Image: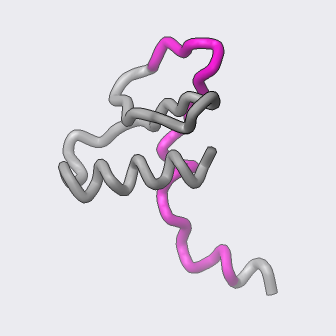
Amino acid sequence: MVQIGRRLYLDHLERFGLRPEPIGVVIASRDGSGRVVFEAPVLLPTEQFLELDLLRPRAHGRSRSRR
C-alpha cells in the first residue's frame, strides 16, 4: 500500500509541484486505485488513508541505521 501511495504522491508532485500540499492519499484495497487528498477524508470500508509522512522519500539516515 505504501508503494502505491508513494507513486500517487510523486505523480502529483510532478504534475502540480508542492502547492497545494496534500495531507495524504486514499487507496482502495480492492483494486489499488487511489487519490491524493487535501482534507480529512471519509473512507469507505474498502479504503485506507496513508498520511503524507509515510509517503515522502526518506532521508539518508535510514541507510546508516541498517549497518
| Chain part drawn in magenta | 41-63
**Residue 37, quarter of picture:** top left
Q: Quadrant of the C terminus?
A: bottom right
- Name the residue located 62 percent from the left edge and 44 percent from the top edge: 1
- The answer to if 28 sits in the magenta stretch is no
At 20% across and 52% down in the image, what residue appears? 15
Q: Position of residue 8 (x, y in %)?
A: 41, 47
Relative image position of residue 40 (x, y in whole percent):
44, 20
Task: State the residue in front, 47 or 38.
Answer: 47
In the displayed structure image, the side of residue 66 where residue 13 appears, left or right:
left
Percent across and percent down for residue 4 are 53, 49
Q: Is residue 58 magenta?
A: yes
- Residue found at the very far right of the displayed protein: 67
Viewer-nearest residue: 20 or 31: 31
Q: Which picture quadrant has residue 41?
A: top left
Q: Is residue 10 above or below residue 42?
A: below
Q: Identify the residue at horizontal 64%, vertical 13% (top origin).
A: 45
Q: Position of residue 53 (x, y in %)?
A: 53, 48
Along the line of sight, the residue nearer the viewer: 14 or 23: 14
Residue lying at 48% horizontally and 35% vertically, measured from the top left: 33
35 or 40, which lies in front?
Answer: 35
**Residue situated furthest bottom in the rendering:** 67
